[in-house]
Amino acid sequence: YDPHSWLDPSHAMFQVGVIRDALIRLDPDHADFFRSNAEQYIEKIQSLDAAYFEMLQRASQKNILLSHAFYRYPAKRYGLNIVETIEDESAVEPTSGHIKDVIDRINQFGITTLLAEPNYNSNVLDVLLNDMNLKIEILDPLETSPGEVTRDTYLAILEQNRLSLMRVLEL
């Protein structure tokens, strides 16, 4: 089970509609305002979604390695192949057998970069990064982002995720 549905823009657009409808039920006098704002925001999400598709059409390979399993929805939407996840659950150290499997998959697919969340803190990840000579790129699940939160944070973070994927996929 992956609770990170908001990382897939198509799910986020649906969620914006659900929020809009709830606000209209709570405050029908401002229904036009809620509709207009939701429509504008959905258009921004659609634009970003199109940028993901356009970028990934140029990818000669779509294999990615994740610190843990938080990117399944967008991977499915955009045709990314999650080669392996190092930790099945955040903050739960993997077994030595699993680490061996991860190393085998890294070698099999020629993985050079680990996609990790901003606050990753794992000795296992650090050892893998060093021993396998992996680079690291940040892929933000929008759970624990440091920094200033603004009303455009969702779009800005998804754009940063897109740029991270661009670097990983060497586009």
Image (cartoon, helix red, strand yellow):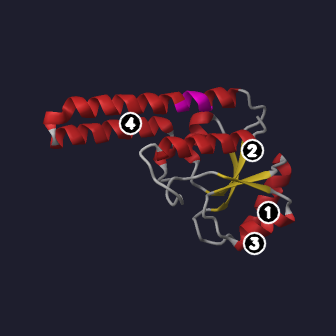
Q: Do the residues labelled 3 and 4 touch (CB within 8 Å)?
A: no
Q: What residue type is labelled 2?
A: Val
- List x then y, in percent, for residue 168: 75, 44
Q: Is residue 39 left or right of residue 89?
A: left
* Eye-nearest disc, 4 or 2: 2
Q: Is residue 98 above or below residue 137?
A: below
Badge 4: residue crowd in 10 Å (few <14, some 14–19, many ≥20): few
* Eye-nearest disc, 3 or 4: 4
Residue in the image at 67% along x and 30% along y = 55
- List x then y, in percent, for residue 31: 20, 32
Residue in the image at 81% along x and 60% along y = 103
Q: Are marks 4 and 2 in contact (CB under 8 Å)?
A: no
Residue in the image at 75% along x and 68% along y = 126
Residue 96's disc number = 3
Residue underneath mark 1: 129
Residue 168's disc number = 2
Q: Which of 19 and 83 is in front in this view?
A: 19
Q: Which amino acid does label 3 sit on?
A: Ser
Q: Quadrant of residue 162?
A: top right
Q: Tag 1 or tag 3, which sits nearer the N-term?
A: 3
Q: Tag 2 or tag 4, which sits nearer the N-term?
A: 4
Where does the magenta region start and end? 48-52
Q: Quadrant of residue 58?
A: top right
Q: Which of 145 and 57 is in front in this view?
A: 145
Regarding mark 1 in the picture, which secondary structure is present there?
helix
- List x then y, in percent, for residue 46: 48, 29
Regarding mark 4 in the picture, which secondary structure is present there?
helix
